[in-house]
């Protein structure tokens, strides 16, 4: 009998950017996909009796992110920036300013992670779907022009949506 319950197995990812006819593959990653969940709290940490001692916290919401390091220069990553047009992989182009005032939910795409059949992760979960995913604000989107393999670290902000309650993502 195994000493614990362990899961491993690769996932593929598709990204369906807003305003594009079809989803595209995000390609191969270095380690996989990291889902981050951060709870926001208001600290009660300043009082006449306890000074700067943290004595209580009040829940103020949740943030969600999806991180990856892409190993391929695919169409998927080139369509991940809905605010600007850019020539990242090949061909002529430019980095131009996007439309100021654009709402994130109007520009966000859908990311679907799908487990690989026949692996222990095939149903743990089988799919992970974020309805509103866009490049994280203030994320330093950068790539190297040089003699080594060009990779692209990515961080997506996952925005919540309303569907039988407020959700960030669903799993099956």
Image (cartoon, helix red, strand yellow):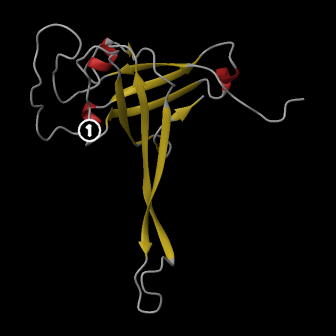
Q: Quadrant of residue 161?
A: top left
Residue found farthest to the right: 1
**In this rendering, position of residue 30 left or right of residue 148:** right
In percent of width and height, residue 163 lies at: 46, 40
**In this rendering, position of residue 157 left or right of residue 115:** left
**In this rendering, position of residue 125 left or right of residue 33:** right
In percent of width and height, residue 32 lies at: 51, 25
Q: Residue at x 61, y 23 (%)?
A: 126
Residue marked by disc 1: 104
In percent of width and height, residue 22 lies at: 34, 12
In percent of width and height, residue 72 lies at: 37, 13
Q: Residue at x 49, y 37 (%)?
A: 35
**In this rendering, position of residue 58 left or right of residue 17:** right
Between 158 and 77, the one nearer to me in the picture: 77
Instruction: Tell me how many marks there are.
Output: 1
| SS category of the residue bearing label 1 | helix
Q: Residue at x 38, y 21 (%)?
A: 15
């Amino acid at each position: 009998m195994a000493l614990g319950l362990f899961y491993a197995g690769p996932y593929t990812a598709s990204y369906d950017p807003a305003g594009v006819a079809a989803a595209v593959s995000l390609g191969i990653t270095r380690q996989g996909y990291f889902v981050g969940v951060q709870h926001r709290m208001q600290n009660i940490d300043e009082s006449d009796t306890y000074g700067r001692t943290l004595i209580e916290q009040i829940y103020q919401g949740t943030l969600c992110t999806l991180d990856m390091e892409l190993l391929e220069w695919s169409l998927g990553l080139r369509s991940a920036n809905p605010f600007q047009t850019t020539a990242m992989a090949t061909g002529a182009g430019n980095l131009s300013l996007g439309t100021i005032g654009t709402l994130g939910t109007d520009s966000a795409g859908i990311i679907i992670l799908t487990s690989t059949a026949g692996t222990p992760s095939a149903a743990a979960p089988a799919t992970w779907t974020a309805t509103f995913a866009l490049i994280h604000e203030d994320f330093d989107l950068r790539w190297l022009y040089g003699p080594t393999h060009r990779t692209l670290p990515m961080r997506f902000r996952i925005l919540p949506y309303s569907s039988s309650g407020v959700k960030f993502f669903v799993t099956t």
